[in-house]
Image (cartoon, helix red, strand yellow):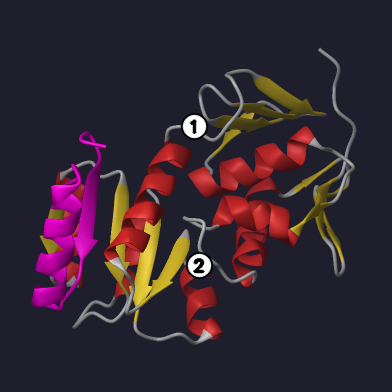
Amino acid sequence: MSSVFVLLVEDDERLGTFTAEYLTGRGLNVVHVVNGEQAITAFHKSAFDVVVLDVMLPGCDGLSVCKAIRTSSDVPILLVTARGDEADRVHGLELGGDDYIVKPFSPRELMARIQAFVRRQRGELLPRSGEVRVGPLVADTGALEVRLEGKTLVLSPTEFHLLVRLMERPGRVLSRDQLLELVKGSADEAFDRAVDVQISRLRQKLGEGWGHRLIKTVRGVGYMLVGEPRQT
């Protein structure tokens, strides 16, 4: 993990310093900033593998920072807040966050989330390099790239993993619990609305194909990709 760069945005300097020291002690490279303006400036100055972003920041809050980052990057964003309300969590994910962790949290849990993000970002959770095809939809697991009718789609690592899993089983329903394993950043419990938000984001990027919505909701069960695999 020594080549992993983390942007830590935490206005509580004591907590931020402790967290940065813990992550640094485990081989990560950490840049700690204390407000939204500093976060946006730091993000555009360096390349980061993960952003750990406190939602409750003075001035430019964390959700505004998240939205700003998403205009130019699909870097994994872990939102941190003291608020446990589900509506706040859903709103953060809708703005582009990849996962959510509520204070107080253990440093080990945070480290586990970051490690999972990095493995996902580097494609270590995917099958060997190759192409998965369903009709005009093609996922290249080596290049971490998706093309629909020849056009490359810009997907976050989480969205990419979800889509590949659905493409591997076209016409078959995957439960929300199965998909949740790809959405959450660690083995700890995550809330199931995270899957719904990620699927919604995927649908927006996929649009329609074959004359209908590509990802179908099976009420009370989960989701499935509609279509037949193309033989190669």
Q: Count residues near mark 2 (Cα–Cα under 10 Å), then give few for <14, some for 14-19, many for 20+.
A: many
Residue tagged by mark 1? 123
Quadrant of res 139: top right
For residue 38, side relative to residue 156 (left or right): left
Q: Nearer the viewer, residue 153 or 168?
A: 168
Q: Is residue 19 magenta?
A: yes
Percent position (x, y) of residue 38?
A: 13, 64
* Residue at disc 1, secondary structure: loop
Q: Is the C-beta separation of discs 2 and 1 under 8 Å?
A: no
Amino acid bearing label 1: Gly
Say which quadrant the C terminus sits in: top right
Give the answer, above or below, for where 108 lies relative to 61. above
The disc label shown at residue 93, or none: 2
Q: Tell me where residue 166 sits by quadrant.
A: top right
Helix, strand or loop at label 2? It is helix
Which contiguous range is marked in magenta? Answer: 1-30
Q: How many marks do you count on the picture?
A: 2
Which residue is depicted at the point 87% across and 44% down? 226
The residue sitting at the top extreme is: 232
Q: Is residue 70 visible?
A: no
Where 105 falls versus 174 (above or below)?
below
Report the residue at 18% width, 42% height from top: 27
Q: Residues within 10 Å of mark 1 (few under 14, many from 20)?
A: some
Q: CA distance from mark 2 to mark 1?
A: 22 Å
